[in-house]
Amino acid sequence: MEAARRRQHPGAAGGPGAQLGASFLQARHGSVSADEAARTAPFHLDLWFYFTLQNWVLDFGRPIAMIDSFELLYYYDEYLGHCMWYIPFFLILFMYFSGCFTACKAERWMPGPALLLVAPSGLYYWYLVTEGQIFILFIFTFFAMLALVLHQKRKRLFLDSNGLFLFSSFTLTLLLVALWVAWLWNDPVLRRKYPGVIYVPEPWAFYTLHVSSRH
């Protein structure tokens, strides 16, 4: 009976062969896990390119094509869209950003196409922040991202190429907003239009008051 049971379950006897096989499997699985842990996600060029292009076409082209028959749509975008679109949008970006960390220092760089996309991406977020009047939401998201970077750095985790791209785009956006506000800081007309504590003029308001009025 004992011999039959050993023939049916050869590893149950705990002999040298079974121990060697177990050691081999454990080493193999441990090697795969190490390789998978070291492997980081590549830069998603197609995703970020399509995302940036789509945002520019939909958000920048929409006011140009706006006519009187779309007043209800404009009201929805101007008032309700802040709660139903901008807050989930930045929340999703932050959730994505929180997964863009790696322990591999070799991945702490951006490829050439990513560097080329930083400028149009940052310019789009500048337009979104200024035209949508969501500076408070943007700056809150930016500082949350910065705090997360500092927190993960203590754990020796660093941004991968996708995280660097998103953080660089937001940094460029903050710089562009600061330059925009500094340039129009002493504009008397826009000062009357935006009398609040946070002074971030809308690009289309500037265009309407200073560019189109001259023609």
Image: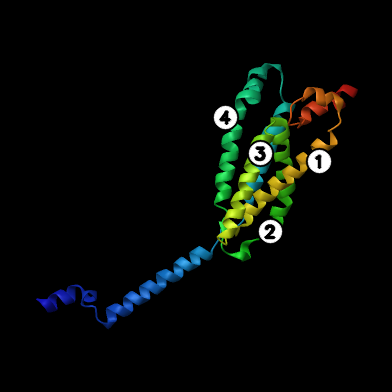
Amino acid carrying label 2: it is Pro
* Front in this rendered view, residue 112 or 104: 104
Q: CA distance from mark 2 to mark 1?
A: 27 Å
Q: Secondary structure at mark 2?
A: loop
Q: CA distance from mark 4 to mark 3?
A: 15 Å
What residue sits 45% from the left and 68% below the top?
32
Amino acid carrying label 1: it is Leu
Which of pointers 2 and 1 lies earlier in the amino acid sequence? 2
Q: Which residue is mark 1?
A: 179
Q: Which mark is residue 138?
A: 3
Q: Which residue is mark 4?
A: 84
What residue sits 62% from the left and 29% below the top?
82
Between disc 2 and disc 1, the foreground one is 1
Which of pointers 2 and 3 lies earlier in the amino acid sequence? 2
Which of pointers 1 and 4 lies earlier in the amino acid sequence? 4
Q: Quadrant of residue 213?
A: top right
- The crowding category of the residue bearing disc 1, from other C-alpha atoms within 10 Å (few below 14, some 14 to 19, many at least 20), is few
